[in-house]
Amino acid sequence: MTLQRTLLITIIALAIALTWAGTRMLLAGGYAHQSKLFLQDWRSKPAPVEKAWQVAEHAARQAVALYPVANGQYYEQLGRVYHYRHRNLPTGSAQATASREQAASAYRQAIAARPQWPYSRLRLASVLKSQRQYNDEYKQALTQGFAHGPWHGWIVRQSAYLGLISWHTLNTAQQQTITTAIEHGLAQSAKSKKYITGLLTRLNRQDLLARSGE
């Protein structure tokens, strides 16, 4: 009788725990979807309206808080919400410092939760670049981001852009990684090839174009 009662209590406790976790996951998913819709809407806009940004930030934070464990996707979305807030302000802007630091913090959490996911690493490198922080963390995020997704179109283009912008801060091995990203972009889709070619021309780095054999 004691064993049966123990098993019953265990089953009930497990059912309650699963219901609790499932409910939190469901709510988190709803908030995450809401913040994702805002991010999609902002792609074609210079910067979000403050009221809309506040709603998106609340949704993204709720998604992170409600999910039972650290969720890399939700942390990345939170980082993007902070990253978008002052996207129209120039590099190194003091007004944008707080939101960009919050974005970097969220991206770090996303990387910790999903270390193989390249997008979080490149987004971290991007937000560090926006504050002129070409430090070791930036360089690691840049090179490892490309290493984890060398044939993803956006990863290749973003790696090439960030690498060329910060070329003078990179060592020989890091520059070789960016050269490889450029070669991948030129050999990839027509979209990537057009972007890389235009980027090299704008930055007056036709030497890298010639080196790739184009």
Image (tube, helix red, strand yellow):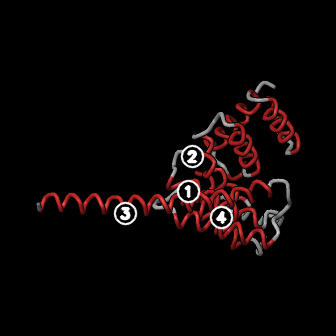
Q: Badge 2 is on which residue?
A: 117
* Distance CA(mark 1)–CA(mark 2): 9 Å
Does residue 35 appear to the left or right of 65 in the view shown? right
From the image, which quarter does the C terminus lie in?
top right
Residue located at (47% from left, 58% from top)? 22
Q: Which of marks 1 and 2 is nearer the N terminus?
A: 1
| Residue on which disc 1 sits | 110
Classify residue 46 as left or right of residue 57. Answer: right
What x and y, as percent, mark residue 146? 63, 42
Residue at the outermost top position? 213
Depth check: give the residue in front, 206 or 104: 104
**Labels 3 and 1: the sequence-earlier one:** 3
- Kindly report which numbered mark, 3 or 4, lies closer to the viewer in this rendering: 3
**Badge 3 or badge 2: first in the primary sequence:** 3
Tag 4 or tag 3, which sits nearer the N-term? 3
Disc 1 + disc 2, Cβ < 8 Å: yes
In this picture, residue 145 sits left or right of residue 160: left
Q: Which amino acid does label 4 sit on?
A: Ala
Q: Which amino acid type is marked by label 3?
A: Ile
- Residue 169, given in percent of the width and then of the height, sits at 68, 53
In the rendered image, which residue does mark 4 sit on?
103
Mark 4 burial class by Cα count in 10 Å: few <14, some 14-19, many 20+ = many
Amino acid identity at mark 2: Trp
When asked about the image quadrant of residue 132, the answer is: bottom right
Q: Is residue 37 above or below residue 96?
A: above
Q: Do the residues labelled 3 and 2 touch (CB within 8 Å)?
A: no
**Residue 90 location, x and y as percent?**
82, 65
Crowding near pointer 1: few (<14 within 10 Å), some, many (20+)?
Answer: many
Circle number at residue 31: none
The label number, if any, that marks residue 16 in the structure image = 3
